[in-house]
Image (tube, grey):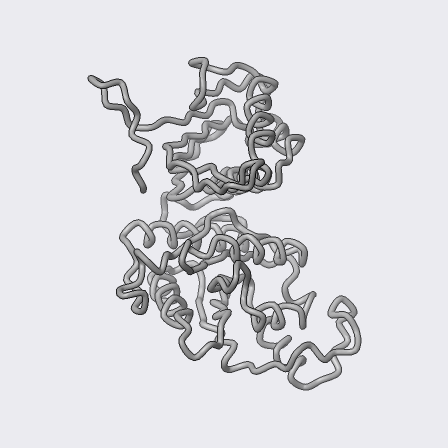
């Protein structure tokens, strides 16, 4: 059974990361597809990086480095819990990551962040660092706000939808590790894992502004019911033009898909959840975006799951003709 480490990324006396890690561990304990263990940096004190050779060399001189490498090496994947300090991750977390290389590589990782704005900046930096280390970062994230998910900004009281978001993140971390989703009987099978990884790849490509990468996700005859006119966009070229407009409208794009559920048949599949597109505008203003309903429909073509239809929508006031754009999952 795979082992997933829950890494507490802060050692500050007033930290809240230990509460968050316990919450993640409690949700993991309900599962039968992986074993979860909290790894607290307080229990692994590391001086500022003092190895003479880069971690890539894998030649660790100091006992504290070898002990840290042994701890991290026994896990198959990770959930990293990080606060946001001055729009970044804590130095102690960066230091702990920098000590190693091979022990991180090719392992699945999900990010749970917290802060005034949910720790979005820290999460983005941490994902980029993990991807640089060739970790397999999953698209779902959990962003806990000090205003709404902590009582009096101190005690963790996550809103109900955060439980579903965390379960989805754990699903994807386990799927990235094992190649199958085994959380429930309905989610077993390599095809379902492949479909969900395909959505992860779409999210990653949008965040990276990778138009070429997105082009590999769609069938040539894809039909898209996007949020903008006309009623439908037919063909991969039309779909990619929509994404190109997004990339020119934002200096930096943020995108997340939450509460994704998939149903898979022999050669067709669909997945549905909630998505939010935001980012930094050319003038520097930041917009969090609007939550919408998203549906992806797939066909297996030449052994590969490709999107043949997708749809984005918001609830509508039928009589008033006005969409509801302030709802949250």
Residue that sits furthest to the front in the current view: 283
Asked if residue 129 is positioned above or below residue 74 in the image, the reply reads: above
- Residue beneath the point at 48% across and 64% down: 82
Give the x, y percent position of residue 36.
Answer: 44, 67
Q: Quadrant of residue 50?
A: bottom right
- Residue beneath the point at 42% across and 55% down: 118
Asked if residue 151 is positioned above or below residue 308 in the image, the reply reads: below
- Residue beneath the point at 48% across and 62% down: 84
Asked if residue 205 is positioned above or below residue 161 in the image, the reply reads: above
Residue 92 shows in the view: yes
**Which one is nearer the viewer's eye here, 315 or 79?**
315
Q: Quadrant of residue 112?
A: bottom left
Give the x, y percent position of residue 48.
Answer: 66, 78
Give the x, y percent position of residue 132.
Answer: 67, 55
Question: Total of numbered circles in the picture?
Answer: 0
- Residue beneath the point at 45% across and 30% down: 296
**Which one is nearer the viewer's eye here, 117 or 59?**
117
**Which one is nearer the viewer's eye here, 205 or 284?**
284
Q: Where the C terminus falls, by quadrant?
A: top left
* 325 sits to left or right of 63: left
Residue that sits furthest to the left in the current view: 319
**Which one is nearer the viewer's eye here, 93 or 58?**
93
Give the x, y percent position of residue 22.
Answer: 37, 69
Residue 1 shows in the view: no
């Amino acid at each position: 059974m795979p082992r997933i480490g829950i890494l507490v990324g802060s050692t500050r006396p007033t930290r809240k990361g230990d509460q968050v890690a316990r919450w993640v561990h409690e949700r993991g304990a309900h599962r039968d597809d992986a074993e979860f263990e909290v790894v607290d940096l307080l229990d692994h004190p590391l001086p500022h990086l003092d190895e003479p050779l880069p971690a890539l060399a894998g030649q660790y001189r100091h006992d504290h480095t070898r002990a840290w490498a042994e701890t991290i090496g026994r896990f198959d994947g990770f959930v990293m819990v990080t606060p946001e300090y001055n729009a970044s991750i804590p130095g102690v977390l960066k230091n702990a990551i920098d000590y190693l290389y091979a022990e991180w590589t090719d392992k699945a990782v999900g990010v749970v962040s917290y802060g005034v704005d949910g720790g979005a900046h820290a999460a983005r930096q941490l994902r980029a660092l993990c991807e640089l280390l060739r970790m397999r970062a999953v698209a779902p994230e959990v962003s806990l706000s000090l205003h709404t998910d902590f009582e009096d900004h101190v005690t963790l009281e996550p809103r109900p939808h955060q439980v579903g978001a965390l379960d989805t993140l754990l699903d994807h971390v386990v799927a990235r590790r094992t190649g199958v989703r085994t959380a429930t009987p309905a989610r077993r099978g390599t095809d379902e894992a492949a479909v969900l990884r395909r959505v992860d790849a779409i999210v990653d490509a949008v965040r990276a502004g990778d138009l070429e990468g997105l082009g590999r996700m769609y069938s040539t005859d894809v039909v898209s019911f996007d949020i903008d006119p006309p009623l439908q966009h037919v063909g991969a070229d039309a779909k990619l033009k929509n994404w190109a407009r997004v990339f020119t409208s934002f200096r930096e794009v943020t995108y997340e898909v939450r509460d994704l559920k998939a149903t898979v048949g022999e050669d067709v599949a669909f997945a549905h959840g909630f998505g939010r597109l935001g980012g930094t505008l050319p003038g520097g203003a930041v917009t969090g975006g609007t939550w919408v309903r998203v549906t992806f429909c797939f066909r297996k073509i030449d052994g590969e799951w490709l999107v043949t239809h997708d749809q984005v929508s918001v609830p509508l006031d039928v009589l008033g003709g006005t969409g509801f754009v302030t709802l949250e999952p």
